[in-house]
Image: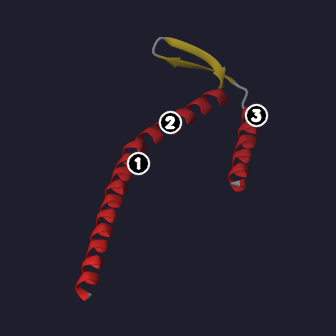
Amino acid sequence: MSNLIIVLLLGIIIALIFSFQNQTEVVIYFINLAFTTKISTVLFITFAIGVLLAFISVIPVLFKYKREISRLNRKIKDYEKQLKVNQEQQKSTEN
């Protein structure tokens, strides 16, 4: 957990350094709108949108794996029940 905190803090420091060094104003045109903002802001927003889209694209796979894990867990429980029944039958035939 502490490694994760160190990596996050390092990322924040790098982002702040990048932001302070990239203060140039740019004009962003989108459809009929024009925005004037700093280039670092544009890059951070673009990065955040990319991360969000990547996460959204992974969600169906995560649900698929979750369903598969649930199915396999049910199968394991069924096999454990069958094993228990077979062991009880074997004990009763030995007596």
Q: Quadrant of the N terminus?
A: bottom right
Q: SS class of the residue under badge 2?
A: helix
**Few, some or many residues within 10 Å of mark 2 (<14, 14–19, 20+):** few
Q: How many marks?
A: 3
Front: mark 2 or 3: 2
Residue 75 on image: x %, y %: 30, 62
Mark closer to the chain start, 1 or 3: 3
Question: What x and y, as percent, mark residue 69?
Answer: 37, 56
Q: Circle 1 sits in a helix, a strand or a loop, which is it? A: helix
Residue situated in front as seen by the camera: 76 or 39: 76
| Residue under the point 52% across and 33% down | 49
**For mark 2, what is the residue?**
52
Give amino acid for label 1.
Leu
> Which residue is the site of mark 1?
62
Q: Observer-nearest residue: 11 or 79?
A: 79
Q: Residues within 10 Å of mark 1 (few under 14, many from 20)?
A: few
Which mark is in front, 1 or 2? 1
Residue 22 relative to residue 82: left or right: right
Which of the marked residues, 2 or 3, is nearer the chain's N terminus?
A: 3
Q: Look at the numbered discs 1 and 2 and tell me whether their residues touch, using CB distance below 8 Å.
A: no
Q: Measured along the vertical axis of the image, is residue 69 above or below residue 48?
A: below
User: What separation in Å lies between label 1 and label 2 (alpha carbons)?
Assistant: 15 Å
